[in-house]
Amino acid sequence: MLGFGRGLITLAASLVVLLAFPRAAPGQISGLQPDVVFTDYSPLSGNTELVRRLLSPLAAALIQQGVTRSGKAMSAQSIDLAKEAFTLYVPPQPPPRGYGLLVFISPSQDARLPEGWAPVLNRYGVIFVSAARSGNDQNPLTRREPLALLAAANVMGRYPVDPERVYVGGFSGGSRIAMRLALGYPDLFRGALLNAGSDPIGDGAPAPPPRDLFLQFQNASHLVYVTGEQDPERRQMDAKSLQSMHDWCVFDLDVHLVPWAGHQIASPGSLSWALNALQKPAQADPNALAACRSGVERDLAGKIQQVETLIASGKHDDAQKALYSLDARFGGLAAPLSVDLAQK
């Protein structure tokens, strides 16, 4: 069906060992807890769901094609939690409506609570959790993303967490993974702390997820960008990401440019600013959102018409290139028609 993405075939091969794991009873301990081992699995971290939410439809189809050719079934989960460790920090007193939760993704292999963050987390009543061995050198789809999702599931199973205050965040490369998770899982994460790392949507960056999830992301997700004033590379990344968000009808955005700071993790003061911004209710202008969505839909319809015209003219190579471009840009918004066109 498809002729691209050898790397996705390799990835498919890594997902074909079926695993089953036990569950454990929840417990509640406050304070800093290093090397925590979780035991509970979530359907949200399953390989099928990761592929559906985080890959474009044609890439997901290629993954499934590779699994089918292997003659095996896709594994339920890619993570063996018995071999993983998490750093957990729980404020001593839960707020009346439950804790907030910040799932943090590091660019390095360790999972430390950043210096000075504990008093801020206490003040806002936010639990911090971060997975070890989830740095930039790890595979996003088979490790970094499912580890973050499993961290959220286990903390929410053990502690009273307010589902309206569940956030994902990260620093540098971890921030870029956090943005992908916020995009693909708006039903879990209500916002994201993007600390010195971000991407635009589409065109080689993360594509929009399935339509229902993307509409929820537009409606209710809140993104906060925290970047050092003296970090020009990441400031440029943020500028492209912010413009892309506006182009894709995502308007609930806040930006904090940290004076005199370079490429460094958020200070306690910057964390406080971010948590304060994240807890504010999402405020989408329905008229602006409707007008923006109409423009996106017109653009999508034009690109689909272009592919259909090329197919009808027998220009299959050109049609395939145009279809891959359509898939990378519009992702789940173009499905299932994009997958149907690929069959042609």
Image (cartoon, rainbow, N blue to C red):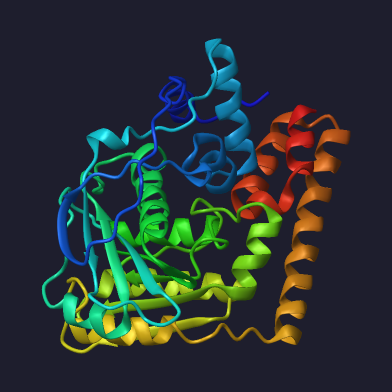
Instruction: Name which quarter of the figure residue 19 lies in.
Output: top left
Instruction: Name which quarter of the figure residue 220 lies in.
Output: bottom right
Q: Is residue 178 left or right of residue 332?
A: left
Q: Quadrant of the N terminus?
A: top right
- Residue 34, horizontal then vertical, whole percent: 14, 54
Residue drawn at the location 53% of the way across and 57% of the way down: 185
As drawn, which residue projects farthest toward the right? 312
Depicted 64 relative to depicted 145: above or below: above
Q: Could one spot residue 249 in this view of the protein?
A: no
Residue 28 or residue 209, whichever sits in front = 28
Residue 75 or residue 286, whichever sits in front = 75
Q: Is residue 275 left or right of residue 271?
A: right
Residue 63 or residue 163, whichever sits in front = 163
Residue drawn at the location 51% of the way across and 53% of the way down: 206
Q: Could one spot residue 286 in this view of the protein?
A: yes
Instruction: Name which quarter of the figure residue 73 lies in.
Output: top right
- Residue 50, horizontal then vertical, whole percent: 51, 42
